[in-house]
Image (cartoon, rainbow, N blue to C red):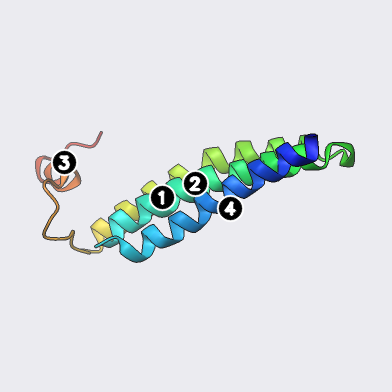
Amino acid sequence: MMELTGSIITLTGSIVLFLGALGILRMPDVYNRMQTGTKATTLGTVLFLIGVSFGHPGCGCQGKILILIVFILATNPVSSNALARAAHTAGIKLTDRSVKDDLKDDTETGEEK
């Protein structure tokens, strides 16, 4: 039963990763692509690792998987934020459909959140 649960969770994580890849292809600018990729890789990878943990309960690797999950949850959003700020500083434009550029407003007034 644990193997079936692990397989379902692993499949769900794989589907989330696949949908994230499709989102990267469909988004109009680098900022939307980055947001799509980050959310999908974070959730998809965490689900995949949880599925592996459930699917192989006797391997003794649950501690390592937990450390990997914590590391992914801590680093993916931070690295995405750093990349988005670097892209904005480099002058990469938003799509014409973007409504507001909060970072531009902050840099014009000299404020940082």
> Label 4 is placed on what type of residue?
Ser
Q: Is residue 30 above or below residue 9?
A: below
> Crowding near pointer 1: few (<14 within 10 Å), some, many (20+)?
some
| Residue beneath the point at 31% across and 63% down | 26
> Seen in the image, is 100 located left or right of residue 26?
left
> Seen in the image, is 99 located left or right of residue 30?
left
> Label 2 is placed on what type of residue?
Asn
Q: Earlier in the sequence, mark 2 or mark 3?
A: 2
Q: Residue 31 at x, y = what percent?
A: 29, 55
Task: Residue under label 2, please give it.
Answer: 76
Residue at mark 2 to residue at mark 1: CA–CA distance: 6 Å
Mark 2–mark 3 CB contact (< 8 Å): no
8 or 108: nearer the viewer: 8
Task: Residue under label 3, please give it.
Answer: 106
Residue at mark 2 to residue at mark 4: CA–CA distance: 18 Å
Residue at mark 1 to residue at mark 4: CA–CA distance: 21 Å
| Residue beneath the point at 58% across and 45% down | 12
> Label 1 is placed on what type of residue?
Ser
Q: Secondary structure at mark 2?
A: helix
> Crowding near pointer 4: few (<14 within 10 Å), some, many (20+)?
some
Task: Residue under label 4, please give it.
Answer: 14
Q: Secondary structure at mark 3?
A: helix
2 or 76: nearer the viewer: 2
Task: Residue under label 1, please give it.
Answer: 80
Q: Earlier in the sequence, mark 4 or mark 3?
A: 4
Q: Nearer the viewer, mark 1 or mark 3?
A: 1
> Seen in the image, is 84 located left or right of residue 95?
right
Residue at mark 2 to residue at mark 3: CA–CA distance: 23 Å
Indicate the quadrant containing the C terminus: top left, top right, bottom left or bottom right: top left
Residue 110 found in image quarter: top left
